[in-house]
Amino acid sequence: MASEQLSLKPGDLVVALKLVLCPGDRYESLAEALGMSLSVTHRAVRRLEQARLLILGKRNANRPGLLEFLVYGSPYAFPAHLGPQVRGVPTAGALADFQSELPGESSAVWPHIKGELRGPSLRPLHAGVPEAALRDHRLHRMLALTDLLRIGQARERQIAKRLLETELKAS
């Protein structure tokens, strides 16, 4: 029997980044932390394993492969478009952590009622992203850098790549 060809979904990247921070995490805790259902999380892990972005059977990220996909694949597979000004959770260059490297550039927010910043709206990779980011600052940083790779210009993408390499090594 031939195996089914699975295609990655945007939320799969959120799962992969959370597994960088919590390798081998149980499906239940992973789903809860990301605001996803257990079945969605399980299918995401399966797709990530097939794409070789997770090590098969370990729920552990293939960090070099993940970095390569985030930098070179995510802008094309999951293109981002800025929308109207809204209140939301900062992402991309709007995250305060990156202001020294990216002053006033690529500011965007994920629309969210708990957001404290106004800016151009950017649809998150998954609906649970803003809440997950508010609960986990390290995940927030990696998701914001991923968004910067998706919406940034060449200079910003280079900075995001460098910072994301550091994040992936530190975890």
Image: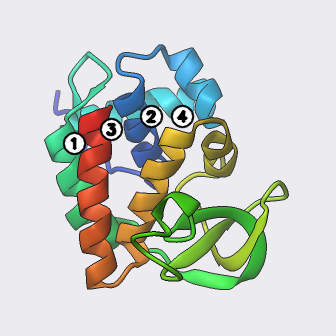
Q: Secondary structure at mark 3?
A: helix
Locate the N terminus by quadrant: top left
Return the residue at label 2: 18
Assess whether mark 3 and mark 1 are in contact (beta carbons under 8 angstroms). yes
Tag shown at residue 40: 4
Marks 1/2: CA distance?
A: 17 Å
Q: Amino acid at mark 2?
A: Lys
Q: What residue is at 49 percent from the left and 71 percent from the top?
A: 93
Q: Quadrant of the C terminus?
A: top left
Observer-nearest of 63 and 99: 99
Residue 4 in sight: no
Q: Amino acid at mark 4?
A: Val
How far across and down, in percent of the image, does residue 8 sit?
Answer: 35, 50
For this orientation, the residue located farthest to the front is: 100
Judged from the image, the secondary structure of the residue bearing numbered disc 1 is loop
Which residue position is annotated with label 3?
47
CA separation in Å, label 1 and label 3? 6 Å
Of the two numbered discs 1 and 2 on the same chain, state the one appearing first in sequence: 2
Residue 25 location, quadrant: top left
Label number found at residue 51 = 1
For marks 1 and 4, the one nearer the N-term is 4
First-in-chain label (4 vs 2):
2
**Is 149 placed left or right of 57 in the picture?**
right
Amino acid under label 1?
Ala
The residue at 14%/43% (across/down) is 64
Does 28 sit above or below residue 141?
above
